[in-house]
Structures are given as structure tokens and as C-alpha cells.
């Protein structure tokens, strides 16, 4: 080996993106790319006077994580606003709102991150907010962004009362007399969110900066932004990405998934796709190697907890009997079957939100139709979330070359699952949740993401659940342990797998020539008891060999092997 490196990490262990390297202990980086992977002795001659060296001291170096489904601008804005994502319990949430209101005079109070599990039935009431903020409108998204909590003033300003009909794509939670309780599900959020003060371009830029900083701090070097476009009161984030890329402020490698608008018809499919093609070309013309819009996001259904996920058979009621409700499909089947083949033929990778088993089946049927078309461009299509998958549909992922995009942190028995989800599904469907192990065994490709700010973006927490099927740091019974992954499988999905779905084929691996997007774990996770994986943190993160996060002690600048 020859040639002086810019960066050498030594005396550790190396995960290549596929598995642990059998002998390598060091990685050398030159000109933003991996120059060598080998033993300390093999890379020692890469060290010169200007080389930065990092003593791993037994820690693991691995490719930077790619988050295959995340909302970083939204997450960054929430961290800068009334952020409830790190509080637990209704009382703590209300205390946080009160403190925020006192510190931020003005009209609207917005933000979010409250947990459905903190409130009876997952539906907080307007009166609780009224007691602490009676004279200003409040609208707070819940943690999964499929519902919102409004106070009476916000409902009044929006004209939402007992006479207001439910929108086609949502539901107003009501008292027996029809009076809104303060919880708005899915499309009903827009009844109030349309009145929120418009987020400025500078606000969005601040949100992206905070989101990127936070994601880098947990080892994420690239992502797919799962909504680029106007959605639920949020502005299109394309301009802020292009602005950050032009200014050199966008260090991450990002694919934006263009939002498929609701309310369109089959006859409008070609026009919508043509608009996406024009958008993709405008972004490409900007010349950034950090941002592209090559994916399209379709939100096909809601979530199980509020009975808006699209199911093949009805939800159960409180007595364990059929409720007659099978959830919502935001695109009817004919529209979906037209849209996916058209997007595939136009060269887009289709990214579909599916929670219920009917949504999964409909999405697979749409991809099957696209694959059979002579116009198919062979898109890297992926279904995200995959909470309830009918066993008959599991092998179809491999057969259709459809990628499973997993948010593994959710695959465990916790408060929301126990109180809100399991009773609605019943025992049989409960056992169909998050079948990651079976998907891999039947040959499917697996990638991972966080859906932050719905849940933490820290990959190590998701990896912990993927391997243990228990909540991080909780001694609990494993949630269908036959669906657990090995540590190697989970890390592969979150690195090489997710980089592949973003078409970042030179990322996600540690091999000579790959881009040097790296993360350094606080320990060697392969040496830990699996129950302790949630304790792993990210000490260092590099993009193209440049440091973007450093939580460790000052770097060791001694030469390799000395």
C-alpha cells in the first residue's frame, strides 16, 4: 500500500457494510474516499505529517448510517418549537406547553411530539389545553404525525364544531353529542393547520440545520426525506435543500421523496407525473451532488392506533367483536394501480407508506402491475413501516423485487402497542406485525429508517429492538422473537441497504473507492450482550472524510502503531 492518507482510523474493528471484516483493524481515507482497509501494519505507511489519526481503542468503525425514511426539516423545526418528544406523561406534556407559552408570547403555539399512550384512548382533550392556554390557539402534532391536539380557541378560529363533517381522509374525535374533543385524525388536522402562521424560508433553513446536526450526532450521513412537497401545513422543502447545497451547508447525502397529492383522479396521473419529472430536472440542473428528487412518496393509509390503517378485515371493538371499520385508503385502488406503473415508467423509485395489511397488498399489486409493463424502468420500489403484513404477502416482496423499509424501533411490546394496538387487531393479526425475520428468510431486501420525529433517529436504538424485539433498556418479553434479526443483518440494512435504496451505490460500505462516510461507535457492539445494544452511542461521524460530529475526547494524533 502506498500514498499518504488524509485520515487513518486504527486499532479497532471494521464493519464493512456486509459484516465484520475478518482481520481489518484500520481504515485509511484520501480525497474523501476509502483508500485502504486492513490491519494497522498494512495501513501504517499511509500516515504522513499531515495525516489525522484516530485511535479507535477497540471501538467499531462502520459506514455512516443512511436513514431510509425520515423528516429532518420537520424534526428540526419541532426541536426549535414546542417540543414534547422527550417528555413522558400527560402532566409533563402540559407543563412543557405551559412553560413554552410563557416563554413565547404571540398568537399561535405549535409544535408536537406527544405520545398517544399518555392519554386515555390515545386522544387528549381540548379542555386540558384550555386550562393552561385559554386565550391563544394551540395545535400540537402527535409523535406519529397522524393526529393533532387542539385547544378550544384553535377549533373556534377554524370553525370546527359539532356540525363540521369529517373530511374524506380523516376524522374528528367527538363527544356523544358531536362536539369535537380536541383530537384531529389524519386529514382532519388540515382543518386547523391551514391557519398556522406560514413557516418562512429562514425557519425552514434553521430546521434543516438543526435536523442535520442532530442526525449527524447519531451517525447518520445520508437520508431519504420522506415528504418533499406541501403537506399538513408544512411548506415544500426543496428550496431550502437547494439553498443549503448551494451554500455548502448540506453535508449529508439526501434523496427527497416527492409527495403524491391527495384528491387526484386516475385521469390526472399523467399530469402529476409530468410535474414530478419537471421537478426532478430542475433539481438536477442545480448541479448538487448532495440532493436529488428521484423518489415519490405515496401515503396509502394511516395508523392502526386510530383505526385509519387500511385493513383486510375489520378492527375489533372494546369487547373483542368486529367494529365494522377497516380503515382508510388515501388513494383508491384504481388510482394506485395507475400511479405506480406511471411513476416506474418515468424512472422514479416509489416509496409507499403502508401500515395495514390491505395497504401492503394493494401496494404490492401496484408494483406487480408496474413490473409487467413493457415500459418498466425497474425502479427500486420500497414499502415503509410494514406493521401488519398478511403471511400470504411476505414472499411477494422478494418475488416482485420490492424492498422492505423497516422502522424497527416500533417492533416491540410497549405502552402504545399494549393499550391501543393489540386490542384493535386481535391475536392472529397481532402476530403478523413487523415480520422482518421472515422477510429476510424469503429473500427480501431490507433497509431501515427512523421516521424521526415520530421516533428517535438514533440507529442504535432501532438496532437494539431489531435484534432483541424488546424496548431499549427494558427487561421485557420479546415481541415475536422469531422475527428478530442478527446484529449483522440489522447493521447491513441501516448502512449498505439504505444507501442502495437511495441509489448512493458508492456509500454504505467500507471498501477501497467507496465514499468515506463513516461512523465510530462508542464501543464494539459485537462484544456486547445483545440486551445492552441500546447503550451504544456514536462518538465520531465523517462525511467524505470530513468530521461532522465529534462527541469523544480530543482525537489521538499519534501515528498508527506507535
Image (tube, rainbow, N blue to C red):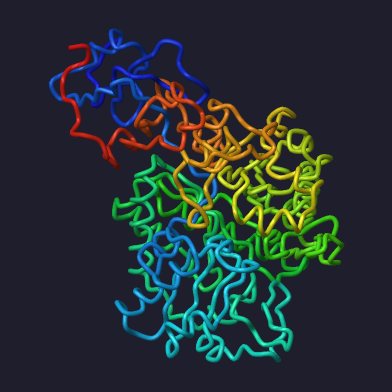
Q: Residue furthest left?
A: 49
What x and y, as percent, mark residue 11?
29, 17
What x and y, as percent, mark residue 263?
70, 72
Say left or right for 72 vs 161.
Answer: left
- Quadrant assignment for the C terminus: top left
What x and y, as percent, mark residue 215?
39, 48
Compared to residue 147, the image places residue 541 above or below, namely above
Residue toward you, 348 or 492: 492
Residue toward you, 529 or 212: 529
Say left or right for 162 vs 414.
Answer: right
* Total numbered badges shown on the rendered structure: 0
Q: Residue at x 60, y 81 (%)?
A: 191
Say left or right for 447 vs 248.
Answer: right
- Quadrant assignment for the N terminus: top left
What x and y, as percent, mark residue 165?
72, 85
Residue toward you, 160 or 351: 160
Say left or right for 438 vs 215.
Answer: right
Compared to residue 492, the image places residue 79 above or below, namely below
Amino acid at each position: 500500500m502506498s500514498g499518504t492518507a488524509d485520515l487513518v482510523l486504527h486499532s479497532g474493528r471494521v464493519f464493512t457494510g456486509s459484516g465484520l471484516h475478518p482481520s481489518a483493524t484500520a481504515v485509511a481515507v484520501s480525497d474523501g474516499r476509502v483508500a485502504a482497509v486492513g490491519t494497522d501494519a498494512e495501513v501504517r505507511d499511509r500516515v504522513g505529517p499531515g495525516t489525522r489519526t484516530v485511535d479507535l481503542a477497540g471501538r467499531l468503525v462502520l459506514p455512516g448510517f443512511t436513514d431510509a425514511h425520515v423528516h429532518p426539516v420537520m424534526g428540526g423545526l419541532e426541536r426549535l418549537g414546542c417540543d414534547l418528544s422527550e417528555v413522558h406523561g400527560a402532566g409533563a406534556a402540559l407543563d412543557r406547553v405551559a412553560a413554552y407559552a410563557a416563554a413565547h408570547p404571540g398568537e399561535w403555539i405549535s409544535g408536537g411530539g406527544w405520545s398517544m399512550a399518555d392519554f386515555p384512548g390515545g386522544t387528549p382533550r381540548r379542555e386540558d389545553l384550555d386550562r393552561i392556554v385559554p386565550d391563544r390557539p394551540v395545535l400540537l402534532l402527535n409523535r406519529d404525525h397522524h393526529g393533532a391536539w387542539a385547544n378550544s380557541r384553535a377549533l373556534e378560529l377554524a370553525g370546527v364544531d359539532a356540525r363540521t363533517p369529517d373530511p374524506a381522509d380523516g376524522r374528528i374525535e367527538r363527544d356523544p353529542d358531536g362536539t369535537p374533543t380536541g383530537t384531529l385524525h389524519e386529514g382532519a388536522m388540515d382543518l386547523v393547520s391551514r391557519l398556522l402562521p406560514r413557516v418562512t424560508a429562514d425557519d425552514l433553513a434553521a430546521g434543516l440545520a438543526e435536523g442535520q446536526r442532530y442526525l449527524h450526532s447519531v451517525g447518520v450521513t445520508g437520508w431519504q426525506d420522506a415528504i418533499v412537497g406541501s403537506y399538513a401545513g408544512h411548506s415544500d422543502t426543496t428550496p431550502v435543500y437547494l439553498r443549503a447545497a448551494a451554500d455548502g451547508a448540506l453535508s449529508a447525502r439526501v434523496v427527497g421523496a416527492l409527495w403524491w397529492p391527495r384528491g387526484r383522479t386516475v385521469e390526472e396521473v399523467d399530469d402529476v407525473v409530468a410535474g414530478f419529472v419537471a421537478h426532478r430536472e430542475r433539481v438536477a440542473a442545480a448541479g448538487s451532488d448532495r440532493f436529488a428528487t428521484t423518489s415519490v412518496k405515496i401515503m396509502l393509509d394511516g395508523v392502526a392506533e386510530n383505526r385509519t390503517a387500511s385493513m383486510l378485515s375489520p378492527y375489533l371493538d372494546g369487547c373483542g367483536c368486529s367494529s365494522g371499520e377497516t380503515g382508510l385508503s388515501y388513494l383508491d385502488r384504481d388510482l394506485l394501480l395507475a400511479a405506480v406503473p406511471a411513476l416506474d415508467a418515468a424512472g422514479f423509485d416509489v416509496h409507499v407508506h403502508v401500515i395495514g395489511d390491505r395497504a401492503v397488498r394493494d401496494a404490492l399489486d401496484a408494483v406487480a402491475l408496474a413490473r409487467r409493463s413493457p415500459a418498466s424502468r425497474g425502479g427500486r420500489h420500497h414499502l415503509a413501516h410494514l406493521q401488519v403484513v398478511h403471511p400470504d404477502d411476505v414472499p411477494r416482496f422478494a418475488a416482485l423485487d420490492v424492498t422492505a423499509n423497516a422502522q424497527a424501533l416500533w417492533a416491540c411490546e410497549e405502552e402504545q402497542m399494549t393499550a391501543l394496538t393489540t386490542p384493535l387487531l386481535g391475536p392472529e393479526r397481532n402476530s403478523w406485525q413487523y415480520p422482518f425475520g421472515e422477510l429476510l428468510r424469503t429473500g427480501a431486501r431490507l433497509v431501515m429508517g427512523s421516521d424521526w420525529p415520530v421516533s428517535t433517529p438514533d440507529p442504535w436504538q432501532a438496532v437494539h429492538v431489531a435484534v432483541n424485539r424488546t424496548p431499549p433498556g427494558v427487561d421485557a418479553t420479546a415481541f415475536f422473537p422469531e422475527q428478530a434479526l442478527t446484529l449483522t443483518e440489522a447493521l447491513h440494512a441501516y448502512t449498505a441497504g439504505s444507501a442502495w435504496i437511495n441509489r448512493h451505490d458508492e456509500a454504505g460500505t467500507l471498501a477501497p473507492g467507496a465514499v468515506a462516510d463513516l461512523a465510530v461507535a462508542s464501543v464494539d457492539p459485537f462484544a456486547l450482550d445483545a440486551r445492552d445494544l441500546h447503550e451504544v452511542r456514536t462518538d465520531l461521524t465523517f462525511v467524505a472524510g470530513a468530521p461532522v460530529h465529534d462527541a469523544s475526547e480530543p482525537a489521538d494524533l499519534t501515528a498508527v502503531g506507535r
